[in-house]
Image: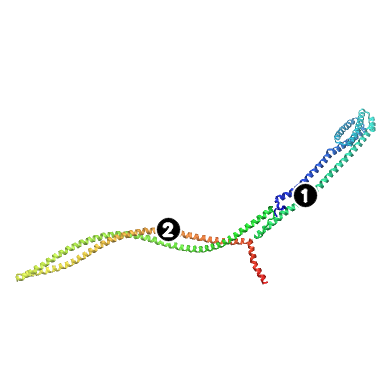
């Protein structure tokens, strides 16, 4: 179908070129014909202006000048003043020269035998007229006015009348030539006008035909393209598009067909993507809402944690201060314990000395007790001896009794002192043992206090480091709180953005839903067919 040659298979440029070419060809033909007719008319006009009009002008000049000379001749006859004849004769001579020049102009323009014959007769009559007039002039100059008047009346004026007849005859011929030339020019103009009208009519008819044909071959496919574009603009992408020509409109229809297919494919992709985006944005919005609530809860927890960390930091700082004070007290206690250990060591040493002295006193008391016992024995022996001595020994017996009593009392006192000393020695020994135990205990206490001091120093340093670390943790928690709050704000913004994206996705789905694809129509047909069958069955 496309291989068959039609005007629709020509490009628009070729069609326009062909149409305008025909019109331009007719215009060129019309212009050429007009130029030819104008050249022809120009030749006629040139012949009229350069030949006919020149001859008519020359004969008219001869006629007017001859008549002027006739009037001058009459003035010569009428005027009786001899002095006035000279300028009149000069005027006649000047007019004669003008006539000679007019005749010189006419001679080469008279190209027919009849014209030459009439011009020759005119020149012969004029020659006789000039000769006669010259004779009249000579008579006037000679003072023979009457003879001059007689010759003028009898010879010159009749010759002037004959000359006027020749001039009138030639003027009549020139008038006829002028009329013929004007008629010929008018005929050429009328013929050119008719030919121009014919060519113009032909140009109008052919131009109108080609304009109608070309415009129809352009406007009809363009109207189809506009219909397709309007259909696509309405969102209907399922209408078939056919291209039946090979010109620009055919390429346009094929391009619209390709555009429709690609647009339909893009709409399918956009529709699927929009639905996916809508679903994903809904999930993102829900997730962002949950994340926002969890972030707010986390922010609240972080605020509580920050408050707890501040309290813990305050407590740890207070513990660090207490540990530092305890370290100072432990150091002071260690110093006091060391001094107490030294005092206990001195007490232990003193208790040893006391124990040694007590042992020595116990030994001395034992000696005293032995001496008292021996003294009692001696006193008893003395009493016995005094009793034996009788009266002489009575006083000695009394002394012995007193000594014995003192010895007994000394022995008793020595025993009591011994008991006390032994008890004291036991207590001193026990005290020394306790002092030794206390010394060792104090040494252990000193070592323990020193250890406690070291531990308290370590605790104080650790508490200080812990306080510093907790302060850093507190700052980090505060920063985390700020970041969490910022994240909460960002999550809210993301939730709002997701909501906006969901709205835009819905709007995009709605906007894409404007386009109707071929499969949409097929689905609608498939959906309506069961209803139609059901309706038919019901009927």
- For disc 1, the marked residue is 203
Horizontal side of residue 151 vs 26, given as left or right: right
Q: Nearer the viewer, residue 107 or 217?
A: 217
> Which comes before the other along the chain, label 1 or label 2?
1
x then y, percent, for residue 28: 76, 45
Q: Nearer the viewer, residue 258 or 484?
A: 258
The answer to whether residue 51 is above or below residue 532 is above
Q: Nearer the viewer, residue 83 or 413?
A: 413
The answer to whether residue 44 is above or below residue 514 is above
- Give the quarter of the image for residue 244: bottom right
Q: Secondary structure at mark 1?
A: helix
Q: Quadrant of the C terminus?
A: bottom right
x then y, percent, for residue 281: 55, 61
Task: Rate crowding at label 2 as few (under 14), some (14 to 19) or many (20 or more) other CA atoms within 10 Å.
Answer: few
- For disc 2, the marked residue is 472
Residue 413: mark: none
Horizontal side of residue 358 vs 280, given as left or right: left
Instruction: Please tell me whether mark 1 or mark 2 is closer to you in this view.
Output: 1
x then y, percent, for residue 132: 92, 31
Horizontal side of residue 511 vs 482, given as left or right: right
Task: Rate crowding at label 1 as few (under 14), some (14 to 19) or many (20 or more) other CA atoms within 10 Å.
Answer: many
x then y, percent, for residue 511: 61, 61
- Give the quarter of the image for residue 362: bottom left
């Amino acid at each position: 179908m496309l291989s068959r040659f039609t005007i629709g298979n020509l490009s628009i440029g070729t069609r326009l070129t062909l149409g305008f070419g025909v019109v331009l060809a007719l215009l060129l033909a019309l212009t050429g014909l007009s130029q030819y007719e104008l050249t022809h008319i120009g030749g006629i006009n040139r012949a009229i202006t350069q030949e006919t009009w020149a001859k008519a002008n020359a004969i008219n000049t001869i006629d007017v000048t001859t008549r002027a000379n006739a009037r001058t001749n009459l003035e010569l006859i009428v005027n009786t003043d001899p002095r006035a004849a000279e300028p009149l004769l000069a005027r006649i001579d000047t007019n004669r020269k003008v006539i000679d020049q007019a005749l010189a102009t006419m001679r080469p323009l008279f190209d027919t035998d009849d014209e030459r014959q009439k011009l020759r007769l005119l020149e012969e009559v004029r020659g006789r007229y000039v000769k006669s007039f010259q004779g009249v002039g000579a008579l006037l100059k000679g003072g023979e006015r009457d003879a001059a008047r007689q010759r003028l009346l009898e010879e010159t004026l009749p010759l002037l009348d004959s000359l006027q007849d020749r001039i009138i005859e030639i003027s009549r011929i020139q008038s006829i030539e002028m009329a013929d030339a004007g008629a010929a020019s008018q005929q050429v103009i009328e013929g050119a006008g008719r030919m121009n009208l014919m060519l113009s009519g032909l140009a109008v008819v052919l131009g109108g035909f080609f304009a109608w044909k070309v415009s129809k071959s352009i406007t009809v496919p363009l109207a189809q393209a506009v219909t397709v574009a309007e259909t696509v603009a309405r969102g209907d992408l399922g209408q078939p598009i056919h291209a039946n020509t090979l010109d620009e409109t055919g390429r346009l229809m094929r391009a619209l067909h390709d555009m429709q297919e690609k647009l339909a494919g893009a709409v399918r992709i956009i529709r699927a993507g929009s639905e996916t985006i809508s679903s994903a944005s809904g999930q993102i919005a829900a997730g962002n809402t949950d994340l926002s609530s969890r972030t707010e809860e986390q922010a609240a927890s972080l605020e509580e944690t920050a408050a707890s960390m501040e309290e813990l930091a305050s407590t740890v700082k207070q513990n660090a201060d207490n540990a530092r004070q305890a370290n100072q007290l432990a150091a002071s206690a260690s110093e006091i314990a060391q001094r107490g250990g030294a005092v206990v060591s001195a007490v232990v040493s003193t208790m040893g000395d006391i124990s040694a002295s007590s042992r020595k006193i116990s030994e001395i008391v034992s000696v005293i007790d032995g001496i008292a016992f021996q003294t009692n024995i001696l006193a008893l022996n003395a009493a016995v001896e005094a009793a034996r001595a009788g009266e002489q020994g009575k006083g000695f017996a009394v002394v012995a009794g007193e000594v014995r009593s003192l010895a007994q009392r000394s022995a008793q006192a020595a025993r009591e002192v011994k008991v006390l000393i032994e008890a004291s020695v036991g207590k001193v020994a026990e005290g020394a043992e306790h002092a030794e135990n206390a010394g060792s205990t104090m040494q252990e206490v000193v070592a323990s206090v020193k250890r406690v001091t070291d531990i308290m120093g370590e605790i104080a340093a650790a508490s200080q480091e812990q306080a510093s670390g907790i302060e850093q943790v507190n700052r980090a928690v505060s920063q985390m709180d700020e970041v969490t709050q910022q994240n909460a704000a960002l999550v809210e913004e993301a939730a709002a953005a997701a909501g906006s994206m969901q709205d835009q996705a819905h709007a995009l789905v709605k906007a894409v839903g404007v386009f109707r694809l071929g499969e949409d129509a097929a689905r609608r047909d498939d959906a309506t067919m069961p209803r139609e069958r059901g309706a038919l069955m019901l009927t």
